[in-house]
Amino acid sequence: MQFASALQNLKDDANITDIVINGVRSVLVRSAGRWFSTESIFSEASELQDFAIDLAESANQALNFKDPFASFVAGDWRISAVLSFGICSETNITFRRVAGVEGASSPDQLFSDQRSGDLLAKIKHHMDARQSVLSAGAAGSGKTTLLRALLRRYPAERIITIEDVAELNLGLPNSVGLLAREPNAEGVGAVSLSSLLSHALRMSPDRIALGEVRSVELVAMFDALNTGHSGAGATIHANSLEDVASRIEALGLRAGLPLPVIARLAESALGLVVFVSAIGGYKIEAVGVPRATSSGLQVIPLG
């Protein structure tokens, strides 16, 4: 199968972090934060659809008319597949590289520009002082890469990571990774991020890291950080440093908390917010501190 060989060649390129197959005619890759078109891999829509289904089946995931979405990890790649079936014009497959232990650089090796280096020094100071850090950015910006590298500076500590897909992969002697789980076909067996966080607090952690804050687990995280479990880390999707405040407020409102409470919890729980970007090269764009104000939560930039 020529398409399998062509796809493997893209995967073997260490500079490529993302591969997207937008139907038969459109294949793009992301390298150094930029998207580039490449040659089409598949010649027939049925060939692409069968390949997507086979990928999902290899990970024990259903992908069919009833379940047209699938997301799973295979090797070094996080894969998301969508069958057309009236949802999109053509079958779509997204591959996103998941860095393993070998790719977990020290934070000093991640950035080449002076400003990022100066801001990184502030971040390390806050984490060494056991203040919790929230790493923010868009998808593929490197927010998890930064958090992984920061946490690996503490090999003598017990660190519990909590994720829905294993991306942090600390590989430290006393680190434990906990993974959320979707329910099975009968609708049972689900394990939520919030329940894992509650359990992690009973595992004698020195630090806790939440791979990505997406929903009501935000409240559980704030509760943990405000009851003595400091020095934690987490990531969140945001488009700017200022956007982090509204994202936190939206998640808190979803959990039923009033805005003033959300703001006070965030200010008390988080020591620093970091915004990273991969546009034009991987860099730290800004850092700030959360503050509860009369108008709600704000993230105040630091110089």
Image (tube, helix red, strand yellow):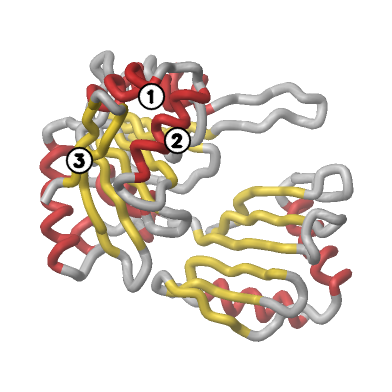
What residue is shown at x 40% (from left), y 30% (from top)? 249
**Number of callouts:** 3
Badge 1 element:
helix
Q: Could you tell which of marks 1 and 3 lies nearer the N-terminus?
A: 1
Badge 2 element:
loop
- Identify the image quadrant of residue 211: top left
Q: Which residue is mark 3?
A: 300
Identify the mark at residue 82; answer none if there is no mark. none
Image spot of residue 24 (x, y percent): 77, 76
Image spot of residue 15 (x, y percent): 43, 74
The reply to whether the C-beta atoms of the residues labelled 2 and 1 are less than 8 Å apart is yes
Q: Residues within 10 Å of mark 3 (few under 14, many from 20)?
A: some
Q: Amino acid at mark 2?
A: Val
Q: Which residue is mark 1?
A: 221
Q: Could you tell which of marks 2 and 3 lies nearer the N-terminus?
A: 2
Give the camera-side residue of 153 and 224: 224
Q: Amino acid at mark 1?
A: Met
What residue is shown at x 81% (from left), y 44% (from top)? 67
Q: Amino acid at mark 3?
A: Ile
The reply to whether the C-beta atoms of the residues labelled 1 and 3 are less than 8 Å apart is no
Image spot of residue 192 (x, y percent): 57, 25
Q: Is residue 280 visible?
A: yes
Which of discs 2 and 3 lies nearer the camera? The answer is 3
Q: Which residue is mark 2?
A: 213
Badge 3 element:
strand
